[in-house]
Every structure is written in C-alpha cells, then in structure tokens.
Amino acid sequence: MRNALSITELESEHTELLPTRETLTFGNTNWASIYASNSSLALNAASLASMANSAAVQTIVVTQG
C-alpha cells in the first residue's frame, strides 16, 4: 500500500466549487425534525444488602422550518 502521491499525480488533481446554497435547495425548503431521548432503568432484585442506582435523562428536540 502506498501512502504518498507523486508530483505528477498531485498536479493532475483539480477542484470545483459547489453551487451557492440557494442553488442547492429545492424550492427554498429548509426543514429538520429531530427527536432524541435517552432513559435509564435499574433493577436490583433477589440480592441482599446491595444497591442499584440509575440516573440518565436526556431529551433533544429540534424543529426547524
């Protein structure tokens, strides 16, 4: 496997600019609807003198029109 490029290979590369953001949209729509939820549950059953702890709550709501 080769990690380096030769000067000839680098000179043959070219770049192109992307169109403006307005061109990339479809009918000027911009939307995002994201909902994420994390929860946690701990159960300690059938054991003597032991503890179970659980604390995890996260909610992310993004609405964009």
Image (cartoon, rainbow, N blue to C red):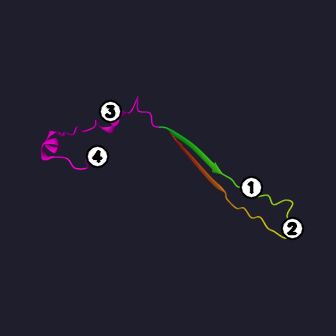
Q: How far apart are the two marked residues, 3 and 4, measured between alpha carbons?
A: 40 Å
Residue that badge 1 annotates? 41
Residue that appears at 49% across and 38% down: 31
Label 4 is placed on what type of residue?
A: Met
Q: Which numbered marker is on residue 48?
A: 2
Q: Residue 50's x, y, as percent? A: 81, 68
Q: Quadrant of residue 15?
A: top left
For marks 3 and 4, give the one nearer the viewer: 4
Residue placed at 86% from the left, 67% from the top?
Answer: 48
Who's the residue at 20% across and 47% down the image?
5
* Mark sitting on residue 30: none
Q: Amino acid at mark 1?
A: Leu
Residue receiving disc 3: 23
Q: Which residues are magenta?
A: 1-30
Q: Mark 3, residues whose alpha carbon is within 10 Å: few (<14), some, or many (≥20)? A: few
Residue 24 point in image, percent of width and height: 35, 33
Q: Nearer the viewer, mark 1 or mark 2?
A: 2
Binning the other alpha carbons within 10 Å of mark 2 as few (below 14), some (14 to 19) or many (20 upward) gives few
Q: CA distance from mark 3 to mark 2?
A: 66 Å
